[in-house]
Image (tube, rainbow, N blue to C red):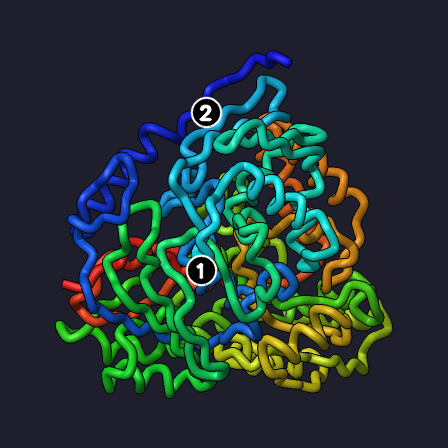
């Protein structure tokens, strides 16, 4: 059937910009793709990047948490589209796409000559397989719900995939830049927990649990070869050990600084320090589904008891930003909601008395991550000042925290950084781990997803304000993107706008 189409060309401009960026990183732009053999890739070059949170396994289709896509998305697994440093959706495995006038049909033109690391060619049948697999029971992570709007996927020919939505969705294409948009080989999903098979510029070389993941340049990559031959992700349970590894030369980059108070010692010509923004809202999570947090007055009392500026200063050396909602400032519907609940311990005590909750002890279960532990200690002290006692339980992350808090909802409060982009939509899911069930919010989110842009932004601001006023959670601060690196490492991201730690632009001078 013929359909009227409006041309979406994130295409020409975005491709030219990305090629220019690649040239700036010392690579030769090849408009036809290719392995960049005459470009700027550095044979034998190695890079070691240190992180705090290690993946429990390598399968982000069945395991929640940010550590797996941080290492593998974009680097090993690619999607049809990706998000760039400016937060724009740009082509990746799709050279271009067209959207029907009613915004329900997406026609993707796929790159030719792309293959998976198992040698299988990438075709529209893999697009169909990958999207339909997200909708199946094979995917279990909560983010899969974003694919519910897909009605059908058709392989028109080898390099033309057509996706039809049941209704217009503002979220869907953006969510295709996240892990749910990753493309999988039909022959390569038997052991995702241990053997990732993708189309990306890197492939898994080694994985030593509790220590490191080693990625090696993919010799058959369809695009420009990355500048670094071998990248090792090293994982440290202790923030001081990560800092010391940087000082001693054990790592070349701290991917996410876990001791911001130590940054002064890196402010010299021997290091470079990068500070930007992220999607990482550090959330004081409330279990809205069980007493006493099911009482809005108790949640409001907790928010009034917390001095957010003191939390940021004490827990994270003042580096970061107060936001007051689940929306970072770079999203189009951001509104400063930090003043919805001011620091007012007297009002907190009044609310607790009104709720007949003056003798509380809360199960405060947090992951063993530096920002969470530091923040929890400050919050615990501030809550004690208004008569709320907390039993602090530090759980091993990711496995134990995911089991106890995220899956079983066995907690009253927790602290975790939610780094997935535009994840305010989780407040529309009453089964999500904070068990917030507000039909008004659910209706606004549904309407916003299909609305025109201006109306969408208005509705999303209403959602953010509603959950803030309803004290559905407390937002302690927005994590900054803090990176320390050796001075010869180029191409590091100033801002972390997606899930991946993107290696594709990195070179060593």
Q: Where does residue 201 sit, x and y in percent of width and height?
A: 35, 55
Q: Where does residue 167 sit, x and y in percent of width and height?
A: 70, 29
- Would residue 502 be found to the left or right of residue 31 on screen? right
Q: Is residue 402 above or below residue 76?
A: below
Measuring 26% from the left and 74% from the top, which residue is drawn there?
252
Q: Is residue 459 above or below residue 40?
A: above
Picture disc at residue 8: 2
Measuring 51% from the left and 29% from the top, which residue is drawn there?
160
Label 1 crowd (10 A; few <14 / some 14-19 / many >=20): some
For the N terminus, the image quarter is top right
| 351 and 310: which is toward the camera | 310
Measuring 86% from the left and 73% from the top, which residue is drawn there?
356
| 82 and 220: which is toward the camera | 220
SS type, badge 1: loop
| 208 and 255: which is toward the camera | 208
Write down the residue under mark 1.
321
Q: Is residue 427 visible?
A: yes
Image quarter of residue 317: bottom left
SS type, badge 2: strand
CA gap between label 2 and label 1 equals 34 Å
Q: Where does residue 9 sit, x and y in percent of width and height?
A: 41, 26
Q: Residue furthest front?
A: 119
Verify CB contact (< 8 Å) between mark 2 and mark 1. no
Specify which label sits upstream in the sequence, 2 or 1: 2
Q: Is residue 109 above or below residue 62?
A: above
- Would residue 256 be found to the left or right of residue 407 on screen? left
For the C terminus, the image quarter is bottom left
Q: Where does residue 173 sit, x and y in percent of width and height?
A: 55, 38
């Amino acid at each position: 059937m013929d359909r009227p189409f409006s041309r979406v060309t994130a295409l020409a401009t975005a491709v030219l910009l990305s090629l220019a960026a690649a040239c700036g990183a010392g690579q030769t732009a090849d408009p036809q793709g290719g392995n960049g053999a005459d470009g700027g890739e550095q044979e034998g070059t190695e890079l070691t990047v240190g992180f705090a949170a290690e993946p429990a396994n390598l399968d982000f289709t069945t395991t929640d948490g940010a550590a797996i896509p941080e290492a593998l998305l974009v680097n090993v697994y690619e999607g049809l589209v990706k998000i760039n440093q400016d937060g724009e959706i740009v082509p990746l495995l799709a050279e271009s796409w067209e959207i029907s006038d009613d915004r329900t049909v997406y026609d993707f033109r796929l790159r030719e000559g792309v293959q998976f690391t198992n040698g299988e060619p990438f075709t529209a049948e893999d697009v169909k397989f990958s999207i339909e697999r997200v909708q199946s029971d094979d995917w279990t992570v909560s983010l899969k719900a974003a694919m519910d709007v897909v009605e059908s996927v058709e392989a028109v020919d080898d390099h033309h995939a057509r996706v039809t939505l049941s209704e217009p969705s503002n979220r869907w294409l953006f969510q295709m830049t996240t892990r749910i948009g990753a493309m999988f080989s039909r022959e390569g999903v038997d052991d995702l927990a241990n053997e990732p098979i993708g189309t990306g510029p890197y492939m898994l070389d080694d994985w030593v649990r509790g220590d490191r993941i080693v990625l090696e340049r993919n010799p058959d990559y369809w695009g420009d070869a990355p500048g670094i031959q071998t990248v090792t992700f090293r994982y440290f349970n202790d923030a001081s050990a990560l800092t010391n590894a940087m000082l001693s030369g054990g790592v070349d980059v701290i991917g996410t600084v876990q001791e911001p108070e130590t940054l002064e010692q890196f402010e010299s010509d021997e290091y470079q320090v990068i500070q930007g923004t992220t999607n990482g809202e550090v959330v004081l999570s409330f279990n809205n589904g069980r007493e006493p947090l099911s009482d809005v007055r108790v949640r409001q009392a907790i928010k009034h008891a917390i001095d957010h500026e003191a939390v940021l200063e004490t827990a994270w050396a003042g580096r970061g930003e107060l936001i007051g909602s689940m929306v970072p400032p770079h999203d189009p519907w951001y509104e400063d909601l930090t003043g919805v609940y001011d620091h007012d311990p007297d009002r907190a005590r009044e609310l607790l008395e009104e709720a007949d909750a003056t003798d509380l002890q809360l199960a405060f279960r947090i992951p063993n991550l530096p920002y969470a532990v530091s923040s929890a200690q400050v919050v615990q002290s501030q809550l004690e000042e208004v008569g709320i006692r907390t039993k602090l339980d530090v759980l091993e992350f990711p496995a134990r925290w995911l089991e106890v808090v995220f899956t079983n909802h066995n907690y009253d409060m927790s602290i975790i950084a939610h780094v997935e982009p535009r994840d305010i939509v989780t407040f529309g899911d009453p089964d999500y781990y904070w068990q917030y069930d507000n039909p008004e919010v659910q209706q606004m989110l549904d309407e916003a997803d299909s609305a025109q842009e201006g109306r969408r932004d208005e509705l999303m601001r209403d959602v953010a304000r509603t959950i803030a006023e309803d004290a559905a959670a407390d937002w302690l601060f927005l994590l900054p993107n803090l990176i320390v690196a050796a001075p010869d490492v180029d191409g590091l991201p100033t801002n972390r706008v997606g899930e991946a730690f993107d290696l594709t632009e990195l070179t060593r001078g």
